[in-house]
Image: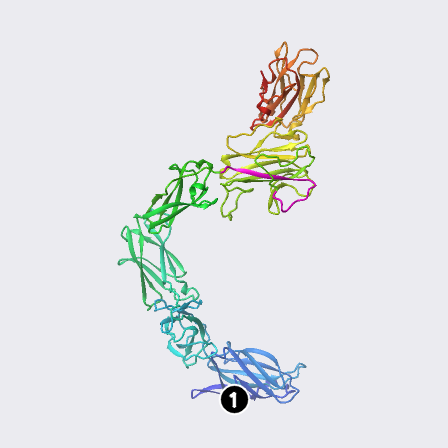
Amino acid sequence: MARATAALAGGALVASVLVPVGPAFAGMADLPAASSITVGGQVCGTEPVEVTLDREGSTSLKFGAVFDGADVTGAVAVTTDAAGVERSHRTYELIGGVLDGSTGSSDLTDDAVNTLTIRARNEDGTTGPAVACSFLLHRGPSAVLSVFPVLGAETVYVSDGSRRGGVGVPGAFAVASPRTPDAVSFAYGYSMDLRFEPEWRTVPATENAVIPFVPTREGEQYLRVAEVDSTGLIGQATSVRVRVAADGAAQTVPPAVTVRRLGDGLPDDDLAPFRFTLTEDLLPWGSGAGQVALYDGTTELARVAFDNRTEDVLVRRSLAGGGYRDLRLEYVQFPGAVTLTDTAQFCLSSCPFTGGSATVKSWWSSGQTDPSYNSAYWAVSQGFSPTPASYTYQWLRDGVAIANATAQKYLSSPADVGRRVSVRITAHGPSMSPRSVTSTPFTVRARDTMHVEYGLSAIGHPWESNYCYCGASDGQSAGLPGSGQTVQALIADPFSESYGAGTSPPTETDEMPWPFWFETEGYVAGRGWVGQKYRDSTPYVGTIGERRRLEAFRIKPGGPHASFYDVWYRAYVPRYGWLGWAKNGETSGTTGFGYPMEDVQIRVLPKGQVPAASVSGNAPYYSKGTQQAVQVSAYLRPSGWRTAAMGGSTAGLTSTSHRLNAVRLNLVDAPYSGGVQVSAKVEGDGWRPYVSTDRVAGTYHRTNRTAAYRMRLTGEMAEQYDIYYRVHVAGTGWLGWARNNGAAGTASYAYRNTAVQVVLMKKGGRPLMSGYGRVAYLG
């Protein structure tokens, strides 16, 4: 039996249908053939059935078949196009002998006869004869159209939720172009609900075809647009949702295009940069961008097509006149659209600003709005015409520019107190001549200085989350000297009623960056130097709950106001008592000895002010690694030589009736080459020549009294270190520190020296402070 065929006769497609398919299926008739087949809802017969897939049917081809006999459980369906090429092949499950299936139609031949072939096939492999059905397929257009609002109508209706226009207020949409080759028109209609068909109207299918829209009711509604082919079939519709405003509630329609001058990186050339920006109303649509031109009178200055929402162009200044110019903007959305015009005033060269004023306001206030009471200022400009593109700032003190004060905000410093502060604001704009105005000066009133509050946490004491650890301030003791309570953590916080301050540098997110802060480090037993940490938002150096000693610390002031203040601090170490004052990042305490601290005092003083020296006259810091390099032996008459003491320790006795009459210094495992030399002032001889390392300076076998000493380093040691030394005098106490060949002791032999201390300090450091301000050599 021959396969069903189709031929064009008299303008109609004809075919033989519902016939068994030839030899390819011979010997497979174990199951019955389909008794009926439907395609697209049409029952197949002796002529090809016509199947139309319109906008509702989409591209899915539905079909069915009936098999007589309950023993048929499955079937195979095959589609072939007009050229006989197989396009789909699939097995379906039958329910009660009925096949209900579908397949895609996009690969089948439109406006031609295609074939559907069905035969029974069960899971055990048994099959039945194949039966073919020919069908004439006609698909409606299925392309998605680009629809966009037309700018320049009385209003512009958009799909972003904006409520525009109103009942009877006309707008329009346009279709970019037809997408199907045989589309002859665009069908369009409006409805309040997508479930219902609109009343269709048509416009020719041309590029940028305009669809009018005059709403008859307010609220949400839908524009539906579809292509219509040459047979009159309406394809799938593209839907656009719009919101029509109630009376008096319409939102403003933005201008189609705006233009502005950009900052000019090369102000001396002939090119001025401009930026054109297309309305957001076209952003979701992707079409209808158009082009814009800029004119000075009849002279075209620039023309650009919108490939992006913003387009930058360079305009030759020489094409336009000088000074302010009223430039005309002409925008055409698409060929044939109405030309939209607007004007804007611009300066292309040497235009003056007019007006303008500068005012200083308080950026941060301590309770008074008058800036003279406060320390954080903010420059405010107003009244310039035209509006400047940018401003620059210069803060003034008594009319003179303040170095580095060129931001809109200014953190006033102690140098401003009693002085007249103002700000000069300069307006700038492309091709504009800068214009400067200065605020009215005001006299800065007296302010609170910088303070510090601090506290300690001791080993064995639990951390108190609700305690501020700020019980001491401005030089008070934070601990208990002699209590045996070992410090494990230090908390220190600068503050002022007039200035901002913090325990660390401000971050970019801080609303007001404070001008003064502490940078604190601590030396922890077994850990070494560590930075600041936080516990319950409280900053500290050291450790909490680890039973580790905080043996030393250092505090460095930071920020713009660090140049106005010094931070002084000292530690109480039971081995020495109060150490000397350290300053601005110097180390206070000890390292390498394992000595604990029991107390701390801290002060913030204006530059030039110095706290009273520690009564002990001790150095601020002793490092075992440094001080053990020098060994000092003392000879007391009549008791003899005493055990050598390292640097920072006492060689001799401070409470004795004996006399210090000779010393011997030695360098042991020094970090650099060189030695140490000592000269002694001996009764009857005066100043004796220097003796070298480990030689006796003074006398220990004669009764002549020794009154004073000079010491010095040699070689690389002299290049890297200073040697400090002082003498203890009975009835007087420790004299002041001498260094590097200076005299230490007494001019008179009547005084009785009893002990000496020697300290090595790195070169370049601050001189040691002497207790009671005493001199090193008592005349």
Q: Main secondary structure of the magenta part?
A: loop
Q: Is residue 257 above or below residue 108?
A: above
Q: Nearer the viewer, residue 397 or 272?
A: 397
The amino acid type of the residue labelled 1 equals Ser
Query: In this view of the protein, can residue 695 be seen by the observer?
Result: no
Q: Position of residue 724 (x, y in %)?
A: 60, 24
Q: Nearer the viewer, residue 69 or 228?
A: 228
Please state the horizontal and vertical placement of residue 703, each as a whole percent of the image.
69, 11
Q: Residue furthest top?
A: 684
Is 189 in the magenta? no
In the image, residue 642 sits, relative to residue 392, either above or below, namely above
In percent of width and height, residue 717 lies at 61, 25
Q: Magenta region: which residues?
A: 448-468
Quadrant of the drawing holding the N terminus: bottom right
Q: Residues within 10 Å of mark 1 (few under 14, many from 20)?
A: some
Q: Secondary structure at mark 1?
A: loop
Determine whether, in the image, residue 751 is placed left or right of residue 560. right
Q: Which residue is mark 1?
A: 16
Q: Is residue 605 left or right of residue 628?
A: left
Q: Residue furthest front?
A: 367
The percent position of residue 749, horizontal first and vertical second, equals 63, 13
- Which of the 4 image quadrants contains residue 418? top left
Instruction: Identify the image quadrant of the C terminus.
Output: top right
Find residue 469 and report its image quarter: top right
Q: Write down the quadrant of residue 11 in the picture.
A: bottom left
Residue closer to the observer: 553 or 644: 553
